[in-house]
Image: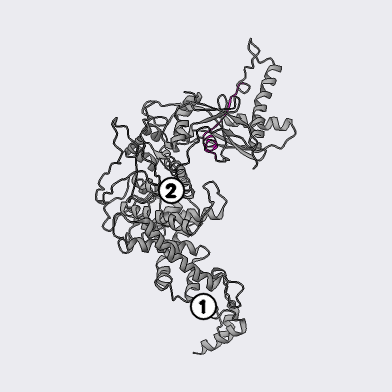
Amino acid sequence: MRACCYYSHAKLFLSSCCRRNTTKKHHSRTTLKSIDITHARVLLLHNRNTTTTTAFGSFPGTTRPIQNYYCPAIKNDIIIKKKKIKKRKFATTATSDNKALFSVGGFRRPPFTDPPKTMKENAEIVLTQKEDEVFSLLLDVVNNEKKSAAAKGETDDGGKATTKMAGLTLRVAGGWVRDKLLGLESNDIDVALDKCLGAEFAAKVNEYLTSKGEEISGVGVIQSNPEQSKHLETATMKVRDVWLDFVNLRSESYADESRIPTMSFGTPLEDAMRRDLTINALYYNLNEKKVEDFTGKGIEDLKIGLCRTPLEAKRTFVDDPLRVLRAVRFASRYAFTLAEDIGVAVEDEQVREGLRTKVSRERVGKEVAGMLRGPNPHLAVEWVTKMKMGGIVMDCEETFSMEMQEFGVKAVAVGMRVAMALKMFEGVTEGADGSEETDRKERFYLALWLLGLRESKAFTKKKKEVPLSEVVVMESLKLRNKDAESVVRTHSNIDGTRDVIFDNLKTFTRTEAGLKIRSIGKDYDIVFIVAAVEDALKQQNSGDIDEGAVAESVAEKCKEAFARVRDEFELVDRKDSVGNPWELKPILDGKEVMKAVGMEKPGPLLKQWIEKIVEWQFEFPGMDKAQCEAKLKDSSRK
């Protein structure tokens, strides 16, 4: 893997900023009850872009006015001189009691985001048949422990079982409850335990299944890692084809001068208050079949579309800085508003340094992938940029200037409009990890977000020059090799696509288009769109732009290009159809080419002849081997 050869403190350089400077349901209803590279530290070799102040408008993507809610309180190793970036405060909506919401707008774009996915007034938890079956089995495990304890005489004076396993209350916590109340299906089932560890209960589940003659599952245990802000040990297992995570309710305390908490069993309230957002701090009590809102705010926030922290935001983010990105991901997924103190907290250097050094890059990359796979990647990218977190997220603060980041915001917003117009990624959801289209969507928006870095370079350990975007994707975000390859391939083909396709939209030949598409591959449509978006944005004046008009223009250009490509290559009923250009193979192999041109041993010239054969195949569709050999012989004599 190329990633293995990067310096841990690689020296990177900026070659230029940007070209041109620029299931049928089983109804079990319940009622709601609300109860209270470091590798990317960059050595700047050229003049750095300074940032310009942008007016922050209202929350993008909604037509409802910003409302006001009150949330009570419950290095760099090798930097040379750099220009100071003017510190910019987050704009808020003024109110009479000075309790405003954090508001991030940008470029005053016309809203095109779907309305917030808020909770309906009389929403209920509706279990599927499989969920009801699995939850009933878990309760059977607890009841079996009670009977076992009674048979052994492990009871108090009132005849109540005294073992911790027999007295368990089981609660499904977090995302599953949130999504169910929003009318969405969810496979993210986390079972919170009040008196034992997850691995202990998982063992009891397998013990019970064995006694019933049922198939058991292996149990995976993910250890806690406080140094990386991973505080809970989690046991994972499959029960009747449903994946479950078991984790204990927690409480934590900090010793003097220590940022690592001491973990202990906690009450449901203590556990809820230590979660990232109120909407993720809801519980479904399996024993009593009811929803519990221990923060007293989760249900309300689902109804009004608000993301806020149970505790004061800075305290929540210092505990686990990744929660900043989680807040952005959930707010963009549901088009919710971010609470004011979140905007204040992200400016705190303790929070920012924590995100730099305390959180593993794998966890950062997972959040970024979730943002881009979600329904509103444009909101996520804009918020990360307005928070001035883009450089921290990509781990290249000295290169990824605010100008580059803001260009990425516009590119993602325009690109999303174009994708919608072309009906791309329809039905693609964040959780569809195995979907090819979900992968394509992630790479598409990542390429747009990182457009400003497409001409920036880095050095490997062996002094080899590579695209900085490759380092960002593989090392800063720890995404897959093929994700990095896709982004680099997209960026490296932008200029050629513009020159061959868009500068000659009416006149490009089948050979020209075929060779270009063959060099790109199956995802040529993504490259076409990204190239057209970049070109259109660079033709705009700096500052506010009409993203709708730009996207409409780009979409029309891309439609025309795709139509011409489809006519030339994809009509298989035509006798002269070439088929998909990226699947085209030379009609002659190396040995046959060498024989035709009289070569005794392979060399660079052989490659040139094979490339010429491919060119002929585009130019003369239907050409057979004999015809190709004749052309080779004729051409080799000249």
Residue 170 in sight from this viewpoint = yes
Q: Name the residue under label 2.
A: 113
Which residue matches tag 1?
A: 615
Look at the numbered disc 1 and give the secondary structure of its residue. helix
The stretch drawn in magenta includes residue 464? no
The type of residue carrying mark 2 is Thr
Looking at the image, residue 31 sits to the left or right of residue 303; the answer is right
Give percent across and percent down for residue 569.
Answer: 55, 72
The quadrant holding residue 540 is: bottom left
The residue segment tinted magenta is 167-183
Crowding near the residue tagged with mark 2, few <14, some 14–19, many ≥20 C-alpha atoms within 10 Å: some
Mark linked to residue 157? none
- CB under 8 Å between discs 1 and 2: no
Task: Report helix, strand or loop for mark 2.
Answer: loop
Rounded to the nearest angstrom, the CA distance separating label 1 from label 2 is 45 Å
Residue 537 vertical position relative to residue 189 in the rendered view, above or below: below
Residue type beneath disc 1: Glu
Residue shown at 40% from the left, 56% from the top: 414
